[in-house]
Image: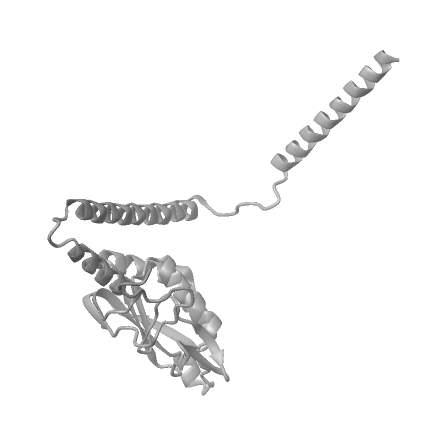
Amino acid sequence: MAKMKGFSRFTWILIVIGFMLAVQYNTIQSPAERDTRDVWEIRKELVEEKQYHSELLTRIRETEDLASQYEESTLDRPERLVEESIAQLRRELGLEAYSGPGFLIHVEPSAEAIAFGQSISPVSPDLLVRFVNELNRFQAKAIEIDGKRLVFPSAIRDINGRTTINTLPIRSAPFDIRVGTDSLDVAERVINQIQASGLADDFYIDNLQLTIEEPVGTIKMAPYDQPINVTHLSEWKEGEN
């Protein structure tokens, strides 16, 4: 009887192992989703990821340098580095005017739409959100759309049938998009990524066309000029515990 129980257990173990091998073989032979990209597409994506990795390492080094400056700061003016850090954060958050490398994008009605008398609808919030997300993914440093500076709490949405940024309506085309970057090289790369991404085609479907100017050493943007609501923070006053 004990021998029969041992044989039965051994049989079930063999069945489970056989089932696992069959599943593994089927997974290897018939993947759920086949990668149809060619070698050049994979190489291009790898180059982009390496560029993002390099930029991340640069930001890490900048943070480490800032930490070293804190440690080496003299006792008579330790607040100087704090003030510089606050100023840098304000610039990065868009609370200060931007002046630096970047480029200009003109959003205009397409020539075909004008020639055939087609109506030009305002750019949709969904398309604009996708465009801004791609710019951020491409490492844009500052963005301004139709004179409205985008910052971390900025919202792009439809209000009463009109596309708004920070609750302010944007004009129908033509209008401009300003993009700031860390350098002219980065600006050139962002332009190439926009052109390769197919975003221009999405605008063209809506009877709009993008005209991207050459990058320049200095492009200017106004600061974000609306109040920022901070829900979970309150101002600390000296003397409070």
**Direction bottom: furthest residue:** 117
Q: Is residue 14 left or right of residue 221?
A: right
Residue in view at x 17 percent, y 56 percent: 79
Total marks shown come to 0
Q: Tell me how the rendering is colored.
A: one colour
Residue 197 in the image: x percent, y percent? 41, 60
Residue in view at x 63 percent, y 37 percent: 27
In which quadrant of the rendered view does residue 81 lie? bottom left
In which quadrant of the rendered view does residue 88 lie? bottom left
The relative height of residue 2 versus residue 205 in the rendered view (above or below) is: above
Between 90 and 140, which is closer to the camera in this rendering?
90
The image quadrant where one finds the N terminus is top right
**Direction right: furthest residue:** 1
Residue 143 in the image: x percent, y percent? 32, 68
The relative height of residue 133 versus residue 69 in the rendered view (above or below) is: below
The image quadrant where one finds the C terminus is bottom left
Between 62 and 200, which is closer to the camera in this rendering?
62
Residue in view at x 48 percent, y 78 percent: 158
In which quadrant of the rendered view does residue 8 lie? top right
Residue in view at x 48 percent, y 47 percent: 37
Between 113 and 35, which is closer to the camera in this rendering?
35
Q: Is residue 41 left or right of residue 27?
A: left
Would residue 215 be visible to someone looking at this image? no
The relative height of residue 123 versus residue 23 in the rendered view (above or below) is: below
